[in-house]
Structures are given as structure tokens and as C-alpha cells.
Image (cartoon, rainbow, N blue to C red):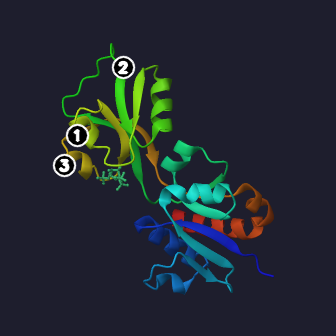
Amino acid sequence: MKTMLNVALPKGRLGEKVYAMFEKAGFPCPSIKENNRKLIFENEECGVRYFWVKPSDVAIYVERGAADIGVAGKDILLEYEPEVYELLDLNIGKCRMAVAAKQGFRDDTDKTLRVATKFSNIAGQYYLSRGRDIDIIHLNGSIEIAPILGLSDVIVDIVETGATLRENNLSVIETIVPISARFISNKASYKFKSEAIDKLVSELAKQVEG
Ligand code: PRP
């Protein structure tokens, strides 16, 4: 019987790019292009089943084995540190994790720095490594508002084009780490389905290099 690969794809624009790469790598599933609200698509002949999940949840599905493989942003992998194998940098979904503040911001090192972020672990580790005392204010979105309203001094967030920062009169003061989409695998799945997974990874790697 053909190995069935269960794939968690990040729903949205990045996921569509990822699907196009998987399709080209020998795992097409035409029904996925039907514009409906279904979340699971299967192509038994090719041995693949795709799930559309929230981008920040991909690593959870893969870590717990509900999906064998998936594609997650490096931001999510650094933040949640899931027990998965990171097998390939797909070199798409590129952005950076950065510290930003209101224009003219000066860090007063006598005071605890108030940091608003969705990425509390990344922010905590970053400032710990620099020996800077911080107070983390964990938010779930619209982080850019925090310094404007005086809720925080700085934010730690994803910057892609920089448009969101610009339009809110904020600017990057430090880049923490570059981010891109990564191919990840469940650890047990990689043992039992290594042949299919390795083949897919090498096909994807050719696309990344090309
Ligand atoms: C991210 C991030 C910024 C924005 C940056 O938000 O949190 O708000 O994208 O992109 P830009 O530099 O191109 O403007 P996302 O759209 O993922 O949603 P969020 O508000 O839930 O964080």
C-alpha cells in the first residue's frame, strides 16, 4: 500500500505558495483548488492528504502527529520550540523579527523596559541574552498600537514590508532574527515514512535552489 503523507499547510497566502511547491514536487491534489470552505483534501493515488490550519497551529499538528509534516514560520518554531525535525528552509515567507519603537525613542536603562509582543519567548530570550530587565506585555495582535497608547516602550514583532510600522509612526531599532518558512516533520513519522518524506524534501530542495 502506498504511504499516505498527512500535510498541515498554513492557511492563507503563504499556504498557497507552499501548496504550489508540493504540487510541483509530485504531490498534486486538484480538489484543493476548488473554492470552498473545506479544510481537508486528499489524493489517494499520490498518497497525500492536505489540511488547511491556522499558520501558528501547524507545529502543534505536526508535533502531536495529527500531521506527519507541515510548513511553519521560523517565528513559530522559535517561540514554541516544538519537538519536531526542521528539515528544510523553503526560502519563502521571508520577513524578520524586530524590535520597534516610536520615532525618537531612547532607551532609559535605569528603568525596566516594557515590551509588547505576541512572541513572549523570543522577546524574553533576546533581552535575557543582553542582560536587559524587561516587563513583557503579551498581546495577541495589533501590537503596533501598544507604544502609541503608552502601553509599552517597544514592541517585538514581525516586519515584512515595514508598511505597518511606517503607517503607525514606528521604526525598527534592532533586528532580532531573519524569518522564513520551514519544512517540519513529526519525529515518529520521519522514522516510519522516511522514504516518502526524504523524496519530497529533495524535490523541494531542488525548487529552493533553482
Ligand atoms: C504581521 C505583523 C505586523 C505585520 C507586518 O501581522 O504582526 O503587524 O504583519 O507586515 P508589514 O511589515 O508588511 O506591514 P499579521 O498580518 O500577521 O497579523 P497580526 O495583526 O495578527 O499580527
Q: Is residue 31 above or below residue 177?
A: below
Mark 2 neighbour class, 10 Å CA radius: few under 14, some 14 to 19, many 20 or more: some
Residue visible at 68% across and 72% down in the picture: 5
Looking at the rendered structure, the number of numbered marks drawn on it comes to: 3
Q: Is residue 127 above or below residue 22?
A: above
- Amino acid tagged 1: Leu
Residue position for label 3 = 167
Q: Quadrant of the N terminus?
A: bottom right
Q: Are marks 2 and 1 in contact (CB under 8 Å)?
A: no
Q: Is residue 51 left or right of residue 152?
A: right
Query: x, y percentage for residue 107?
Result: 29, 22
Q: Which label sits on residue 112?
A: 2
Residue at mark 3: C-beta within 8 A of ligand 1: yes
Residue visible at 22% across and 34% down in the picture: 102
Residue position for label 1 = 170
Residue 62: image quadrant is: bottom right
Q: Which label sits on residue 121?
A: none
- Amino acid tagged 3: Glu
- Asked if residue 101 shows in the view, the reply is yes
Query: Mark 2 or mark 1: which comes first in sequence?
Result: 2
Residue 67: image quadrant is: bottom right
C-alpha separation, residue under disc 1 versus residue under disc 3: 8 Å
Query: x, y percentage for residue 164?
Result: 25, 50
Residue visible at 47% across and 53% down in the picture: 180
Give the secondary structure at mark 3: helix
- Asked if residue 88 shows in the view, the reply is no
- Amino acid tagged 2: Thr
Mark 3 neighbour class, 10 Å CA radius: few under 14, some 14 to 19, many 20 or more: few
Give the secondary structure at mark 1: strand
Query: x, y percentage for residue 139?
Result: 38, 42
